[in-house]
Image: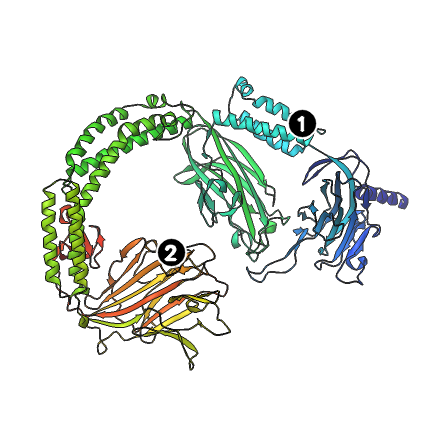
Amino acid sequence: MRKRLLFALAAMCVAVSGFALEQGEFVYTPQGRFQITEANVASSNFTDFTGWTVVSASETKMLADNFNINANGYADGINSAQSLDATAGEGMYFKFEPTDASGSYVVSFKMKGAAQTSIRTRLTAPTSKNVTVNLSNVVRVAGNSAHTYGDATDELIANTAEELTENWQTFNYAIQGDGTSRTYFISFTGIATSVEIADLQIAPAVQFADLRQRDAMLTKLKTYAKCYNWEESMLDEYGMSEAIVNLEAIGDKSGQADLDELLETAQEVLGVFLDENMDDYTSNHHLGIKTSSGNLQKQSTIDGWTCVDRGFWSNNAYPDLGHYQAGNTWANGNPGNAMGVTLQKTLDPGTYVFSIESTAALREPNVSGTWTNDDGMKPAYAVVYVVKMVDGVAADTVVSVVKGLEPVKYTPFIMTAKVTEAGTYEFGLKAYCKEEYKALKNGSVTYVANAYIWGKNENKYNQKQLEYETDVREQITTGRTNLTTAAEYLASEDYFWGKAELQACVDTVETKIAKYEQMDQDAIIATYEDYYVKSTSDSENGLLVYEVYQEAVKDIIAANKKFVAVNDTLNMIQAAIDNAEATMALRLYDAATGKDALTAAISKAKDVQAEMKASQYSEENAAAIKAAVAELNEAIETFKNTVPASAIATIVDIDFEKDAVLDEETGLYSITGNAGSMEFSTFYKDQTEIPANPFQQGIWLSGEQLYKGYVRVGNGTGTIKFDPTVDGSMGTNILKVNFDFFLQGLSGRYVGAFLKNETGDETVAGFYYNFYDNTTDTNTFNILNTNLNYGSGSNYNDAAPEGAEGATGTTCPKNSFEFIFDYGEKKMYATTTSAKGTFTTEKIALNETIPYIFELKCNYANFDSRRVWFDNLKIQRITAGTPTGIETVKDAVKANEGVIYNLAGQKVSSSFKGIVIMNGKKVVLK
């Protein structure tokens, strides 16, 4: 009995530990499919360390210090070497010198290890997202022409990362020579002590056709060939049948070049077949960055697809769904969540084929370096599906497929969906973390690529023909819409010029548009041709779209534009009159002495306006209006300057031109202006130890101080204390605060200004904003970020303030801010002016706490390199008397009652609620 057991053990050892490569055997590798043509030319079955060289930083270390022969392998009936030292760089290599530098060889070996072990390892553990983590392929099949281990000269690398399991696996890699003499080194370094290696084999091989590629294309061809009841003759006509037969003829002995040629032909055949017989329901929007502009940072949608759980990021040719650094479990700490994409489409009954590709990986935390997914881990599986939506909720699943996702190679999904009821359907891919990986904090990423939906509906016309009809009707609707607009213009009492000319155009176009509106679907699609491009400037490709536009639509559009343009010239004077009356009513100018002169200028402008309304458009009349408007605008500016100096107390006036001065006692720098002085918590001038991102007066480049009259905002605060009161009270006066910001986007950082109480522990008003992601910390006046002008991008460390003398290259756009605190009306508001225009916020209740401190602030961190500039701080107290009573209260505003302004002189709509200026009077709109 004992003898029989010994024989059985010996037989098992031969079966398990025998050479992995046999002559005539076909082997799949990452480089393709190869056949072993001869016996092994090199091997090691780990009965000893013959052929192996130690890799160690210590000259005294031996192979036995790093590996133990047959530690656990006997239990599996196999000779093996187990790692004893997982130290980075410690291990061994096997040297192989091919006799044929142009030949191909297969390298094969067995490995096993603890579950969730990769043959790539991290050399340092991350402590934060900004720590650079070095990575190493602990198993490496590489050769170089320097014939030296570790040299990268003319290096060829054959292997990729792999995931180990508790069971033995065979890994095969192909070395493909290019005629250059190289020595190859199969190395195992820094391997976890749970890993064993066995049966290293190297044998000559010849590459043959990769049947996996053949099978993938056959699946695609057969899916489309069988998705609909196509006539066999039609499949023959388009070459689909021949492409299938030719690929099926590819067998074990077929060459890769022959397969490549057939694959290219098959793809061309399929492309023509789909284009002419099925409709593309993704309209070429197949999740490729090449179809979008710019980087895809944090986009929740792209090409109509919606991201699940995280926004899109860019990854060369294809987008990923959000990458997460180490320290987080799957999906940014939400391992139960899916990452994926969905797209909803309105479909008619028919047959639809949905295809998409995806990968998923655990990843290293190197944020600033190169992201790579080659971890060898396979953490996720994906569900690809088509479901019918009812009232926005997924109801019936039409079809679904589940597959595991590879970390590097894209996994293809393709399925046929039979739609029997018209409605809204959702196409989607959702990737889920496998249970065994949900606790791993290695970060994660999921990529998607090449999503297509091709369909064959059961309607009389195909999708392209129906889209053509939609384009034609859209153009007809444009004509009708412009006719309706013209009718409104003709009926309006606000327009006086050009009505006869507009009416003549309406009469002509009305007849033409009415004729097109009578065309039914058949009549429109009868004009369709196979090659169609929506165009209003090309009759050959635009077809009826071109005709409708050229014959009718462009004339009425042009007539409307001309009509409005000539009347805008006339209405310019009304806007100027309204602006003058609104300005005169502002409490900011209560003490102005030029009210009589401005009233006279307004009356003169009204006389010109009355004369012009009785006339018609001409170049002379247009010139007369423009001259009258210019004269009135000049009168407005003159009026503003008639506020006597006695009514204006300038409390703070700093243009930051004077030199910064160091206070030896406090160690702080300050800059004094014509009135007041701003002190900075951090500042750079001459000190040897520069604070992290300090405030600066201008910037030093190549030893030269540039833009000295501007403050370069730093980490910390710039503070000025002032007293705006008269004997401790503001009475009915107005406090006006003006300053300029020159802004750029700051990733994760806030910048702004505050007005605080005397002790600095209460904010009276402020604006503290993150212009990178448009989030607000403080925004008392509800200033809209869309009204401000700011730059975004990278490397703005040397960006100059816009308009600065000598500024070149990147500049920070200018934004002027004005805060108004009216202690008479108990209201406050803000006005911003930038390249986007001038905008005034609605008035809000005044915080009656009097501000005594102005604070400029930014929360830069040590690693930030972008900047914001600040200039022209002025704080004034304006004398204003007790507010006059409101003359009128109205529930609604009629269209003929003129333009409406808020108390800051800005136009508002009739839906505005509160005190406004209308026809020179204060009214309340309710």
Q: Which residue is mark 1?
A: 250
Query: Residue 758, how many percent across, how many down?
Result: 31, 75
- Residue 533's label in the rendered image is none
Quarter holding the C terminus is: bottom left
Residue at image position (20%, 31%) is 505
Find residue 539 and report its horizontal and vertical position in percent: 35, 26
Quadrant placement of the N terminus: top right
The crowd level at tag 1 (other Cα within 10 Å; few <14, some 14-19, many 20+) is some
The residue shown at (51%, 26%) is: 272
Quadrant of res 848: bottom left
Residue sitting at 29 percent across and 23 percent down?
Answer: 519
Assess disc 2: are there few (<14), some (14-19) or many (≥20) residues with their C-alpha within 10 Å of its C-alpha: many
Name the secondary structure under disc 2: loop
Q: Nearer the viewer, residue 367 or 791?
A: 791
Front position among marks 1 and 2: 2
Query: Which secondary structure, mark 1?
Result: loop
Q: Looking at the image, tell me whether mark 1 or mark 2 is earlier in sequence order.
A: 1
Q: Which residue is mark 2?
A: 790
